[in-house]
Image: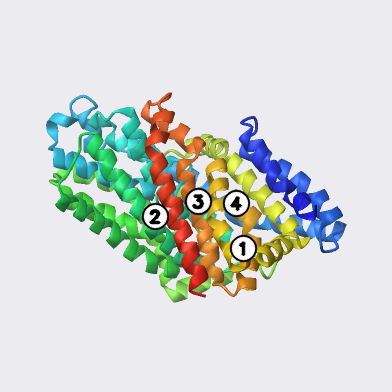
Amino acid sequence: MSYLLWSLPALAVVAAIGSGRFNTTWAAMMGLLIAVPVATLTGPVAFGPEPLLRSLARGLWIGATIAPYILGGLLFWQMAARNTTATPSDDVGDSGANAGMTQLAQRRLLFFACFLVGPFAESATGFGVGMLGTVALVRCLGIAPRHLMNFALLSQTMIPWGAMGSGTMLAAAYARIPATQLGLYAMVPVTLLMLVWLPLFWRTARRAGFGAPIAECAREAAWIAAALALLAPASFHLGPETALMTVYGPLIVLRYLVDGPVDGRSLGATVRNVLPYALLIGGLVSTRLLPPLRDVLRSAWTVTPFEDLPAWMPLFHAGAWLLVGGVLTGLIRGQGHLLGHEARAAWATGKHAVLAVFLFAMMAEVLSAAGISRAFAEGMFATLHEGAVLATPILASLFGILTNSGNAPNSLFMPSQVVLAMQAGLSVPMVTALQHVAGTSMGFFSPVRMSIAASLSHGMGQERAVYLTLLPYAGAALALLLLQATWIVLAR
């Protein structure tokens, strides 16, 4: 009976979102409102007003360290992308693009948009901007909406680094491990899932009329392998906030030059468009790799209300850099008068994500402080022993698909996963990385994300057909995650 009561907050979130009548923010609010009396009345640990207030304060603090990534990324992207010069693909136009490009060039543009530009845009901002960037680049190729929806979704393959890695930072806070460590361990399941995403791209491209010989497929796989090989050390040394942008920025430039030809006019326009991103990335990398500068920024201003939670270092925080970068971009371009409008637009776009982060973080802290997370983990271990880890990708995937985010499964299950891993003698970073990647990456199949892809691709009404195409790939992705869970258990 106790376990059923302890499950009520999670079940409330599932029921609220599954009903279709509540968004993630209201679902999180319902979960928190139910978690408080459940923790107070049934928690294994005494939980009175003082622990409750402390738990809520801890959740608020976690949210405060994450919110700048979301709002800062949105503001920076909006200011940097405003009135940018048209790219060559824009000049071609929807109807005449095919006449000016060979089939091989079109195929390479597809790969460029799906696996380089899309993830980069998603990393800089999140909120489906990767899908928007991908669709904007390839719409001129005259692709059928059902195929274009798949290409849009493929921009989400590196989602653990999306929105400046804010989800990974939040998961690391729940797990009480360094974000750099979680980002590095996340490379394993992310790499495994590429065994699903690449075949999906190849099949969709072939059905859309952009088939390619095996040599070109091997070339694409080599680009993915190189990107992943560079992303691993970047995640460890730079952290998940800046790693993907730092790696993919130069790769995008290199791919752009390799795929040429590039004339002076188009190169100049491209340089002007990417200059704000290049300056921001260069500044962030400098703060991470130059020890004197890094030490000064970290020590100049540090706020640490809770020793076991992330500190707030405004001069070092990537989210603060994004906010300042957005403001400076507007001022330098003479668009300072638009900052208020763009700030309100950023809040309108990101408010539900920000509020959900705060609410889920507070709920996670309440359940953890009341001993419920630990009791759940101990009960699962007593029943299933090490095999309880096999439930990790299943639960995380289901919640990720339902909520279109890894924040909900991480807040609900991450504390329990840490306890479970410790009880079973398993690698805590490996288990937490599996939980995190399963929740974030399987959001690829979320109805919310599908609706965004359909809207961008003018494919409303074709979602069912696309889901039928994606179903085998969803099964393959879950099977790979279960395979890694089995390996974690056997390798202990």
Callout 2: SS: helix
401 sits to left or right of 250: right
Which numbered disc covers residue 440? 3
In this view, the residue in front, 389 or 10, is: 389
Amino acid carrying label 3: it is Thr
Nearest to N terminus: mark 3 or mark 2: 2
Q: Are marks 2 and 4 in contact (CB under 8 Å)?
A: no
Q: Residues within 10 Å of mark 1 (few under 14, many from 20)?
A: many
Q: Residue furthest front?
A: 383
Regarding mark 1 in the picture, which secondary structure is present there?
helix
- How far from the left and from the top, in percent, is residue 253? 25, 53
Mark 1 vs 2, N-terminal side: 2
Q: Looking at the image, tell me whether mark 1 or mark 4 is earlier in sequence order.
A: 4
- The answer to whether residue 35 of the structure is visible from this angle is yes
* 16 up-or-down from 165: above or below: above
The answer to whether mark 1 and mark 2 are in CB contact below 8 A is no
Q: Position of residue 239 (x, y in %)?
A: 46, 65
Question: Disc 2 marks which residue?
Answer: 193
- Between marks 4 and 3, how big is the CA–CA gap? 9 Å
In percent of width and height, residue 460 lies at 42, 25
Q: Residue at x 60, y 51 (%)?
A: 409
| Quadrant housing residue 26 | top right
User: Which residue is tagged 1?
Assistant: 417
In percent of the image, x 27 and y 52: which residue is there? 252
Q: Earlier in the sequence, mark 4 or mark 3?
A: 4
